[in-house]
Image (tube, rainbow, N blue to C red):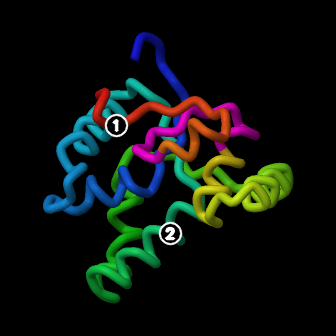
Amino acid sequence: MRRRESCLIDADVIYAFLDPSDWLHEPARRVMKVVERGGVDAYVTPITVLELAVVVKRDISEDAMLKLYEELKSLALKFLQVDEDAVREAFNYMKMGMGIFDAFHAATAKTHKLTIISTDHKYDQAGLKRIDPREF
């Protein structure tokens, strides 16, 4: 990455960062180091938190889900609200077959002109700029 980017961090990266057994953990750690050093302006939304809560509760435990928000607050991430334009755009992405969470992430990135840090190629197909965390 040559210049400082403003990025939306997808839930897959945050989940991998929080779970040392995840296949993406090491790349996610590198991403978060760049974020901590101020190399990127990194954003998440309430939708990201909701997606993580659903996955953590399902895959790990309810207790882990309750600790999730505190862990997220300790990271150098900025919270970005999902506005009406993003909601409208998310419905357009859902009409094109994108899942609910991905549609809201894509719409937020598009309306705020953010690059998405994710392994998910759906964002490429939607015409958004994406950086794979393994590139860090």
Q: Is residue 111 magenta?
A: yes
What's drawn in magenta, residue-wise? 109-120
Task: Name the residue furthest bottom.
Answer: 62
Q: Is residue 27 magenta?
A: no
Label 2 SS = helix
Reading the image, the residue beneath label 2 is 51
Please determine whether, in this image, residue 100 is positioned above or below residue 17.
below
> Quick one: quadrant of the N terminus?
top left
Residue 112 is marked as: none
Please determine whether, in this image, residue 67 is positioned above or below residue 105.
below
Please determine whether, in this image, residue 8 is positioned above or below residue 127.
below
Q: Residues within 10 Å of mark 1 (few under 14, many from 20)?
A: many
Reading the image, the residue beneath label 1 is 133
**Residue at screen point 44% across, 68% down:** 52
Q: Mark 1 and mark 2 in contact (Cβ < 8 Å)?
A: no
Q: Name the quadrant containing residue 109.
A: top right
Q: For the image shown, how many numbered marks are present on the structure?
A: 2
Q: Could you tell me residue 111's position as x and y percent?
A: 76, 40
**Residue at screen point 41% across, 69% down:** 69
Q: Residues within 10 Å of mark 2 (few under 14, many from 20)?
A: some
Amino acid type for the residue under numbered disc 1: Pro
Q: Nearer the viewer, residue 92 or 37?
A: 92
**Residue at screen point 71% across, 48% down:** 107
Horizontal relation, residue 108 to residue 120: left or right? right
Q: CA distance from mark 2 to mark 1?
A: 19 Å
Amino acid type for the residue under numbered disc 2: Glu
